[in-house]
Each structure stands twice: as structure tokens, then as C-alpha cells.
Image (cartoon, rainbow, N blue to C red):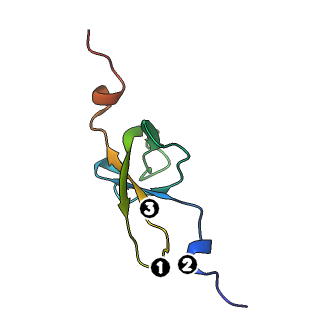
Amino acid sequence: MNPPAPDERHDCNAICLGGPCHGLLTHVDQDIGILTIPVPRRSPDEPEQRAGYRVTRERVRYCGQTEPYIALHWAGPPCSWECSVP
């Protein structure tokens, strides 16, 4: 049996750039906005955290993939995307 072709290994279409999820592949279905991405835990005891990533028009090519990934840029610390300033 042949191994799957590179594009058939996952359904991810985006990559996180910068911040705590740098390099993480994910799937997005929207063109604009800020997504909250779960930050990978280093241990099961670590509390769950999320980070904000902005969907951009930028595309990033990666070896073995025919389609480029959507670049998700880190939106900064939580207060920059989650809190409103009075």
C-alpha cells in the first residue's frame, strides 16, 4: 500500500505565525477576523490557554503541499484582541 500523497495527510489550510502557537497548522473557514487558537499544552496539568490570530491575505508555501497555507498572524497579548479599552 502506498503512503498518502502530501496533500492528503491533513485538512489544514492555515499556519500560525508568531506568538505561542508559532508553526501550528490549523483549518480556517473564514476570510477575515481574529480566531482564538488553543495553545498546545506542555503537560496535562497545564491550564488551557487560547491565543488570538488574525486571518490575513498572505499565503505561505510549504514543501510537499501544492496549495499555500493562509497566514494567521499573532494578534498580541490577550488584552489587544479580547479586552475593550474604556
Residue 1, compared with residue 59, is above or below; it is: below
Q: CA distance from mark 2 to mark 1?
A: 5 Å
Label 2 close to label 1 by CB (< 8 Å) = yes
Secondary structure beneath label 2: helix
Q: Quarter-wise, where is residue 85 in the image?
A: top left
Task: Read off the residue under disc 1.
Answer: 64
- Judging by the rendered image, the residue that carries numbered circle 3 is 69
Depth check: 8 or 51 in front? 8
Q: Quadrant of the N terminus?
A: bottom right
Circle 2 residue: 6
List x then y, in percent, for residue 15.
41, 57
Decide: few, some or many residues near mark 2? Use Cα within 10 Å; few <14, some 14-19, many ≥20. few
**Which residue type does callout 2 highlight?**
Pro
- Counting from the top left corner in percent of width and height, residue 11 is at 59, 62
x, y percent for residue 66: 49, 74
Q: Earlier in the sequence, mark 2 or mark 3?
A: 2
Q: Is residue 30 left or right of residue 74?
A: right
Q: Secondary structure at mark 1?
A: loop
Mark nearest the camera among 2 and 3 is 3
Say which quarter of the image contains residue 86: top left
Q: Residue furthest top?
A: 86
Q: CA distance from mark 1 to mark 3?
A: 12 Å
**Taking the image as drawn, is residue 82 in sight?**
yes
Q: Residue furthest right?
A: 1
In this rendering, the answer to whether 60 lies above or below 28 is below
Q: Amino acid at mark 1?
A: Gly
